[in-house]
Image: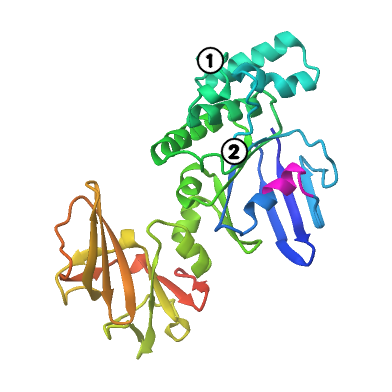
Amino acid sequence: MAELELIALNKSFGPTEVIRDVNVTAKDGEFVVLVGPSGCGKSTLLRLIAGLEKVSDGTILIDGQDVTHDSDRDLAMVFQSYALYPHMTVAENMSFALENMKIAKDEIQRRVAEAAKLLQIDMLLDRRPKALSGGQRQRVAIGRAIVRDPKIFLFDEPLSNLDAELRVSMRKELARLHAKIGGTMIYVTHDQVEAMTLADRIVVLRAGRVEQIGTPMDLYLNPVNKFVAGFIGSPMMNFLPVTTSGTGLELPDTSTFQPPENIDVSKVTEVGIRPDHLTLTTAGAGLMDIRVTLTEELGGETYIYGETPGVDELRVRLPGIRKVARGDLVGVETAAEHLHFFDGDIALPRNG
């Protein structure tokens, strides 16, 4: 396996910049997820790493070696579309690249058998892709990458064509696979749940720039700006406009509260609260009151949506079944350590 380093990477298509001064390091054996909304440049960045697109400016290092302009980087890529040869069997699809590399036949058979057993597709080796389910096809595509024993695995939204239940299953399989083979993996997705559950570290991209890099919990607990705070976490963070009221802060419904001592109230323009960190209380007894507009009862948890003056929608995520009806007036509250404070787009540090 190998370490990957991207240094001041830029990519333009004509006058349009799509990757802007990206600096990212993936350590040997690390699972790094590139995440962001559609059009943020994450797939383009993966293609630059793979050598499928030429770098406009910057450097790509693999184990300290400059490969920016090399076509052969010993990487393996798994595509969203599977990209299997329809006329070949599973075994032939998995062995095709090895045959082109002139690897001995017995070694090819050994690698294919090991990868197939690891991915639990050893009973499918004689089938063709049209006889496979979506999940089985994706396993074959992953197996084709594994047999090459590459320095780095690249995944371009590999689960996006699967249904919801199968995506959860394959997500767990990918996590187990990484634990077993210990490979360096760079994974692209727009799904922040995939990012949170798979990554050792997440790279959040917006408009071709890196907004923040950190562990899933780093990004969840300490986002550097509103974009990261709103993108990481589901449902997304609530943002409430506030104004200064003496030494405290006033919410849109005119209720006031006192922030931690280290927060300069004169700089705070909005307060962020994750739906998971809100609890219900009686009206008038919490941080603020909301009028319930919708409830979603999922059995194991309940989503409550409400409105209050100056806030069109406030989201609350609660464990278990909660009997709250549309039109009810309820209070919401949270612990002070769960509040996030923003000066415009920038998050203010909550400690020290």
Task: Give, as a single range, the part of the protein colored magenta.
Answer: 46-53
In the image: residue 112, left or right of residue 117 = right
46 shown above or below 120: below
Where, by quadrant of the figure, is residue 272 drawn?
A: bottom left
Where, by quadrant of the figure, is residue 341 drawn?
A: bottom left
Kind of residue at badge 2: Ser
21 shown above or below 161: below
Residue 326 position in % (x across, y down): 18, 66
Q: Nearer the viewer, residue 117 or 339?
A: 117
Q: Nearer the viewer, residue 27 or 115?
A: 115
| Residue 293 visible in the shown view | yes
Q: Residues within 10 Å of mark 2 (few under 14, many from 20)?
A: some
In magenta segment, residue 98: no
Q: Which mark is residue 81?
A: 2
Residue 97 position in % (x across, y down): 73, 24
Residue 26 position in % (x across, y down): 66, 45
Q: Which mark is residue 122?
A: 1
Q: Which mark is residue 222?
A: none
